[in-house]
Amino acid sequence: RQYQRRVRGKRPFMWVSPVLLLAASALSAASPRAPVFSWRTISPFFHSSNQTGPFSDHAITVIAKFPMVTIEKFQGACAHSPHVGPSCHQEDLITSELGRVKAIAPHVCAIFYYNSVLNFPQYQLWQTMQQQNQSLLLHDAAGRLVRMSCPSPVGHCDVFDFSVEQTRELFAAECVNATRTGVVDGCFLDRSVDGTPTDPTLDPTKPGNKYNLTHQKAVAYSLGHVQVLTELQAAISPGPVIANHAYGPPLTNLAAGSVNFAMIEGFTPNNQSIWQLVVAARNNRGVQAHVGGCGSVTVHHFAAFLVGAGTNSFFGCGPWTSPWDGGLDISSAWLKQYDYLAVSYTHLTLPTKRIV
């Protein structure tokens, strides 16, 4: 089955064979690009969505200032509806907004968001999985569908079963398809190492089990989760796979060479956040350090960031979704400090007794 939607004169979002796409991704005329990074200033990123509809032209102009842009899973007013249809599919809505950004700033590294555990109903991927008689979704030892709590209108989401090869193929194709629109460079994969049915674990062969899975299924799922993220990174490289919280050993699984980016949620000027930056850098991994509210960012956040940051470390803030054009001012996402030279922060003393 195929569908397509024209995005600002770019190639359409088209669904074809997952296997063919994975094999041919390296031959795409518009190859995914790595983000542009500089030590001259703080390298910022934008990660959010507009829950009232398309971003205004003014908002797109502001967003296009960021070298790295992710559009979240609640793009558009209907994404929060319990009765989502084709007009709400995030595959189209996210790529449409990223296409508008790219039309202004082609150098921006544009990121498509989806969750690596929860099968959100506002994606066409949800419909694709449902049409497979639920055989691609995770079931417990009693044969019941595993459903996890999630910010969905129905309050729960099905879970991808990565022990199944076809699930891994369809899941990876979601991102590869997005990159082949010509306006997407990489993908943000939420719940990459935690918030899964088998966490917490540093060793996928010794998984946790919170959802009454058989031990065999828990191990196969954990190994399959690592496998699909690793194979996806290989398929879209040098474009980024941003695996949330995946700093790498010794803090998390996903060893060096698996994915090339991680995110720190709730970045704070303390030793824990600095150490997460250091570990990511040691694993040759870029990182996005995210602070919840832009109004809460202090000069100490920037100083701590620069203490631990390695190459391809980016800084950002703000809500995952907001009525950007009906409430919060989009200009607040671009902090004035992003225009300062990075050396401006290096003389500051952090409010901590010990630096890692």
Image (cartoon, helix red, strand yellow):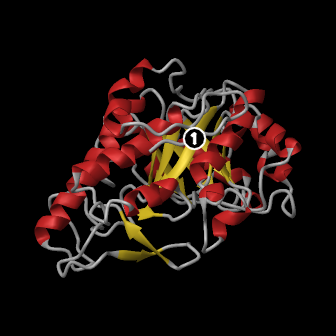
Query: Please, is residue 346 above or below residue 148 in the view?
Result: above
Horizontal side of residue 266 vs 9, given as left or right: left
Identify which residue is drawn at 53% across, 60% down.
353
Q: Nearer the viewer, residue 275 or 183?
A: 183
Query: Of all residues shown, which one is farthest toward the left?
Result: 216
Q: Nearer the viewer, residue 274 or 79?
A: 79
Q: Nearer the viewer, residue 236 or 311?
A: 236
Residue pointed to by mark 1: 111
Q: Is residue 355 visible?
A: no
The three-letter amino acid code for the residue at tag 1 is Ile
Identify which residue is drawn at 86% across, 64% down.
327
Q: How many marks?
A: 1
Identify which residue is drawn at 66% across, 49% down.
93
x and y percent of residue 166 in the render? 27, 49
The crowding category of the residue bearing disc 1, from other C-alpha atoms within 10 Å (few below 14, some 14 to 19, many at least 20), is many
Q: Quadrant of residue 77?
A: bottom right
Q: Is residue 321 visible?
A: yes
* Quadrant assignment for the N terminus: top left
Say what secondary structure mark 1 lies in: strand
Query: Please, is residue 76 above or below residue 171 in the view?
Result: below
x and y percent of residue 349 in the render? 64, 50
